[in-house]
Image (cartoon, grey):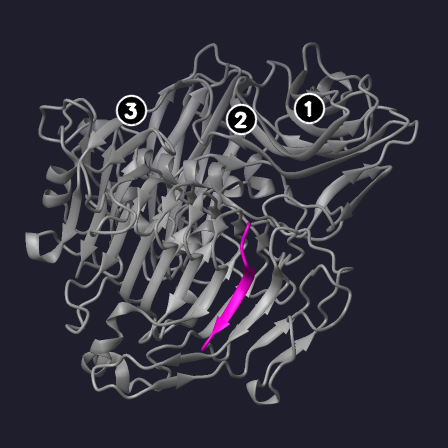
Amino acid sequence: MIPFPFSSLERLLRRGVSASCFIGLSICSGFSPDGSVPGNLDDLMPSSWDLTTVSNQIWVAPGGTGDGTSESSPLGVIQSAIDEATPGTVILVKAGTYLEDLAITKGEGVANGTNSSPILLVSADGPEQAVIQSSGNVTTVRSSRISNWGVIGFKIIGSGSKTSGDNSPVKLGATDITAGDPCNNWLIAGNRISGQGRDGTKYYSGRNIHWIGNTYDGDWGQEGCDHVIVGVQNTNGDDNQFAFNTVGGSALYTAITLKMGTNNFQIFNNDFQIDAGSAAIRLGGNGTLLGLIDEIPYQTEPDFDPQTGVKIRVLYNRFTADVGTNVQFYGSRGCEVSYNDLSNPNASKDLKDGIADLDNDANGDPYLFTPDGNLVTDNKIVSSTPNVFTGALDDGLNYTISGNSSTVVFNYPVGASHLVSHISALISTLRDGPSTDITLVENGDFETGDDSSWNTTGASIQSSITHDGSAYAAMVTPSGNYRKAIQEDIPVLAGETLSAEGFVRMSGFDGVHKVVYQLRFYDTDAGGLYNGTVANPVSAGNVSIASMTETVNDDWEHVSAGNLIVPNDADIMTVWLAAQQSPTGSVYFDDIGVYASDVLPGAQLLLDPDFANSNNDGDWTVHSSASIAATAGMDGSPALHQPAGTAYTASSQEVDITGMSTLNASGYIKTNNLASGKSALIQVRFYNSSDVKIGSESVGSLGGTSGDYVQFINAAVAVPSGAEYATLRLAVNGGGQGEAWFDDLQLKNAP
């Protein structure tokens, strides 16, 4: 087999990533016409959070009697974990039903998270596996005067009255709305909000709230999601978000209301299915707290009006709700409603403009707020006429209305279903730590807008039908011939374990011919596919991820496979997306991913490869200028620290390789301020029985200042004939300035 040095292809992996790429899962990157909507799950959280700081775990399980320090010793009550949590804690709740009324409140001694290190309450076994149900006519999960918390992946059930009591399934806000001590920086993600109560969720007197990927299916006495005085002091207007939610069930008034001065809010990619008496979305409106308006600390803010909704953007939403109107302007100013599907057959009107004329403040003086300066553009509507309102508009309202038409094409992803896999990945990462998998497929989401990295036959890259909001998908349109999109020459290691996933959408097939997503493995020594030369794959070299024959499948289907073992003779792989020669129908592929673990196959030859034994006991021969730095490694673990000298400096470990033919090698390097032209390097050297060096192979090198650790891999290193032992060398090749660190080395006898 021809050795294939991965380091020469820069197959690199960074660990200890920053918050901006903690999950790194593309949701909707680049799909919005103006690029205004976030494209990664990380961007749908409070922007100051660094989830790499969330490392302390408290475990909870039904009937648990332990101290919560491990999955095998869980607490039995969620509230106990909440009371113990400190910044940087994730509370991992095992599957089961918990009859608790959770209080995340300052008055009861619960800690705040910090702007960088939040506290997260998580359904550890995946979305909706842990169920929290209230004991009666009270709120199921309530918080007051607490900031920087998250609630992720639960089924939360309200059991209260729809007409009286403090009983929403989720309620966040200050105990006293005049105190100026709100709940800021919250994430409510991937939950199912069920049962009944006054509202499904309620949030008041705070900012930077993120309702992401939730499903509402309860019966609410007022609103599905109510907001009062939200975002008034926001420093980043886009940090209040209601996105990718599915809002079903029923409500007396609205699916979501943003009232009493709520401003700087984005509502995007939601699926509004609710049966509501008034509107799906109400922008503006008063509340029962209007009599306290003169006492609210925020009244001097320039954007604060006690009854308006200000600077609220409603983008890329779909409305199928049984409502009086889709979007209601009710004393709102400077709001935008654009790129939505308002062609709702169940609404009596597309939009409704409203003027609030209130006379119920403490002094009896009227508050009059007229909608002003609102924008309504480029929405899909029922009528072909440009005026989307019913009735005449007052010229003084200053609406800007353009581009709304029944011919507008709406193909944006909506609803919680598009985030299920992303929420699951977030939960897994919080539970198990950041993934160390290496992504093998380039341009798997086709975001380049062309077939870059792919060879296509009878296929194209387009944007009219996409998954998860990605701007592009690979499309195959069968017309009697085999159509395909393939990515070739992907290096793999014999015996390594892969996983693969993707999304497939098809319609109109004849029920006989198939749509396939395969991994095909090749042996370059046997004349396999290499540099464009086509030959047969190696024996047992095809792995099917999907094989479909549906005649109609008008939604995206997630397909995946794990524990895929690369055949012993394979050294490269092709990803194969294809449609057989059905005379009719179309198929689409998107978000294709194939992943390899950073753990190389084979038996480890090194002792203390991660320097956990700081004394080494002779395992490593450490240069006199080098040392073991106790907390300088990845995840705060030990690492070898090697300052640069004026000449070559190296530490090493010798291993016996008698009878071995192939080695797999890898390691992580981090550099700081190395001289120009100088580098830190990992190298394998081979010696015969006379201690003569008879060969060497580079694993990787890194110069300058890298900032983070970078992994280098050299797979299938051929052992020279006559070699009896090898040394793995960790070195800096001079320069007299700077330093380097080495961690998590692998030198293995390849299977």
At horizontal 75% and vertical 50% (from top left) the residue drawn is: 450
Residue 571: give x, y in percent of width and height: 64, 23
> Which element type, helix, strand or loop, lies under badge 2?
strand
Label 3 is placed on what type of residue? Answer: Leu
Q: Which residue is mark 1?
A: 518
Q: CA distance from mark 2 to mark 1?
A: 12 Å
Magenta-drawn segment:
322-331
Q: Nearer the viewer, mark 3 or mark 2?
A: 2
**Taking 584 as reference, is 29 left or right?**
left
Position of 354 with respect to 3 (left or right) is left
Is residue 323 found inside the magenta-colored segment of the image?
Answer: yes
Q: Is 250 rendered above or below residue 305?
A: above
- Considering the numbered disc 1 on the image, is that residue within a helix, a strand or a loop? strand
Q: Earlier in the sequence, mark 2 or mark 1?
A: 2
Q: Earlier in the sequence, mark 3 or mark 2?
A: 2
Magenta segment's dominant SS is strand
Residue at left offset 74%, top offset 41%: 474
